């Protein structure tokens, strides 16, 4: 009768020490076998060379059991990977249970656990799930690529921010140094003026002191003569010195006791307070000192109601260091060296057309600024919203209230993109933009002739920004500074 027992079992090829299939099995003196490494580790722990099964002593270096080693290799080849065998039946896992979503062997298919379940081949199930996994993998790869791009742009932003910080630091140092230099020069000028006035006053006093010393010397000489005359006897005084003490118009019959001599005349010409006016005017130097210096600084410090935002500027536009003028990078004019180019990075805020926005937006109130366009032949100025499209190349963005010059005619552009020529209007050198957010009005004026070029009436529902557009400029477009005034006097 045939036996259903398998010709080999795992126990036949299992090491008694590690309980795994033999690896480099050795034959001990007692006839038992074990892995070479397991035997030596066991001996090191026990401290003696005895068999792990029967405790009999064995030779120091047991020989390799080649027959068992070959059988173990054959057994492993026949058994296959344990992961591909059924844990319950030891058969190869060739089926996939669709209901339980797990692999099964042929024996499992006939068991009560999978009764009336649907099975498909393992390769077919693996193909379906690998296909789904591949789709997921592709999505993850795209996500990874997107994250890598984000990381790359973040790295670019890090470098760009460092370059911006360096550029801003240099500009701050330069502008502050200009103010410091102005204060140093003003300080030196005021001290020089004080020194000159002090020397002038001292020289005047020195001259007066010299004159006084001379008069003191002359007066002292007269005093000595008078004292000598007074020491003479009365007869001799009246006989010889009387005429010296009588004025030229003195009547001989007048009482000599009421006459006034030369000494009183000399004394009356001296004024003890004659030097009191020779002092420095302290109030002239210290009165409102800081205000006077600040007021003088306004001749060098300019204020513009609008400044440009470099983060929105097209890469071909170059802005001035004070952010009040713009030009094309290819333009050639005298002031090119005075307009350093800040670092440029392609960001969502940046225009792909030759445009730049003002740095500050307006939600309410009345605002006004002047732009010097000069003899430039292609320009467009106006206002727009923050959500204006910025990535359309070489196209002036829609949604703006603008005025411009196309090389021949002055024209305006409505928020809907409609151009309207202004044939009767002369090309201005300076354009004034007046934005009234409360009334929804945008005025374009020529301040030189005080005429209105055009007016838009438009209701803005979001923040409004100044916008500037220039092509092939002959000179920079400049935002004109405002004059600052200080109201003096008491304000109730």
Image (cartoon, helix red, strand yellow):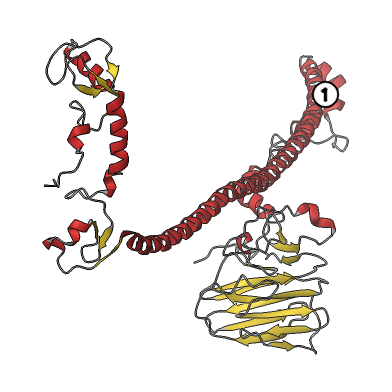
SS of the residue under disc 1: helix
Q: x, y percentage for residue 336? A: 80, 55
322 w.r.t. 73: above or below: below
Q: Report whether residue 410 is seen.
A: yes
Q: Position of residue 158 (x, y in %)?
A: 55, 48
Image location of residue 419, percent across then percent down: 70, 86
Counting from the top left corner in percent of width and height, residue 88 is at 16, 50
Q: Residue at x 78, y 36 (%)?
A: 200
State which quadrant residue 236 falls in.
top right
**Residue that lies at the very extreme toward the front in this rendered image:** 1
Q: Circle 1: is it few (<14), some (14-19), or many (20+) Cα within 10 Å?
A: few
- Residue 208 lies left or right of residue 356; in this view the side is right
Asked if 402 appears above or below 275 in the picture, the reply is: below
The relative height of residue 60 versus residue 215 in the rendered view (above or below) is above
Q: Which of the 4 image quadrants contains residue 458?
A: bottom right
- Whether residue 260 is visible here, answered yes or no, is no
Residue nearer the viewer, 446 or 144: 144
Name the quadrant containing residue 237. top right
Task: Work out whether residue 324 or residue 36 is closer to the camera in this orientation and state it.
Answer: 36
Q: Which residue is mark 1?
A: 218
For the residue pair 306 and 103, the one nearer the viewer reads as 103
Image position of 459 with respect to 369: above or below: below
Nearer to the camera, 436 or 376: 376
| Left or right of 269, for residue 482 | left
């Amino acid at each position: 009768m045939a036996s259903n027992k398998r010709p080999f079992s795992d126990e036949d090829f299992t090491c008694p020490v590690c309980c795994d299939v033999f690896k480099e099995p050795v034959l001990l003196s007692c006839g038992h076998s074990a892995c070479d490494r397991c035997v030596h580790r066991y001996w090191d722990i026990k401290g003696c060379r005895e068999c792990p099964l029967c405790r009999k002593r064995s030779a120091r270096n047991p020989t390799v059991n080649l027959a068992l080693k070959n059988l173990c290799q054959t057994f492993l080849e026949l058994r296959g990977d344990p992961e591909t065998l059924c844990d319950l039946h030891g058969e190869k896992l060739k089926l996939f249970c669709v209901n339980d979503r797990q692999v099964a062997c042929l024996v499992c298919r006939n068991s009560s656990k999978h009764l009336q379940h649907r099975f498909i081949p393992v390769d077919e199930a693996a193909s379906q799930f690998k296909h789904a996994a591949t789709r997921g993998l592709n999505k993850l790869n795209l996500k990874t690529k997107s994250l890598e791009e984000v990381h790359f742009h973040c790295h670019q932003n890090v470098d760009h921010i460092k370059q911006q910080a360096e550029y801003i630091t240099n500009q701050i140092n330069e502008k502050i140094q200009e103010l410091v230099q102005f204060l140093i020069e003003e300080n030196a000028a005021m001290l020089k003026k004080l020194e000159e006035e002090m020397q002038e006053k001292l020289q005047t006093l020195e001259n007066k002191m010299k004159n006084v010393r001379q008069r003191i010397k002359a007066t002292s000489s007269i005093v000595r003569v008078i004292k000598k005359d007074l020491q003479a006897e009365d007869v001799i005084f009246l006989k010889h010195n009387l005429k010296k003490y009588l004025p030229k118009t003195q009547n001989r019959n007048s009482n000599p006791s009421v006459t006034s001599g030369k000494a009183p005349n000399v004394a009356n010409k001296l004024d003890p307070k004659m030097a009191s006016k020779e002092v420095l005017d302290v109030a002239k130097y210290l009165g409102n000192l800081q205000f006077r210096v600040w007021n003088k600084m306004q001749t060098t410090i300019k204020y513009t109601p609008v400044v440009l935002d470099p983060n929105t500027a097209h890469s071909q536009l170059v802005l001035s260091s004070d952010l009040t003028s713009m030009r094309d990078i290819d333009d050639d004019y005298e002031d090119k060296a005075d307009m350093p180019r800040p670092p440029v990075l392609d960001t969502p805020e940046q225009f792909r057309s030759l445009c730049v926005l003002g740095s500050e937006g307006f939600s309410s109130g009345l605002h006004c600024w002047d732009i010097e366009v000069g003899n430039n032949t292609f320009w467009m100025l106006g206002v727009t919203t923050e959500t204006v499209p910025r990535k359309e190349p070489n196209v002036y963005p829609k949604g703006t209230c603008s005025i411009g010059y196309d090389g021949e005619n002055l024209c305006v552009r409505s928020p809907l993109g409609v151009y309207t020529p202004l044939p009767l209007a002369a090309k201005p050198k300076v354009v004034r933009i007046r934005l009234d957010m409360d009334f929804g009005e945008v005025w374009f004026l020529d301040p030189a002739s005080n005429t209105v070029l055009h007016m838009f009436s438009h209701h803005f529902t979001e923040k409004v920004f100044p916008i500037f557009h220039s092509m092939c400029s002959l000179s920079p477009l400049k935002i004109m500074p405002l004059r600052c005034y200080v109201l003096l006097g008491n304000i109730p």
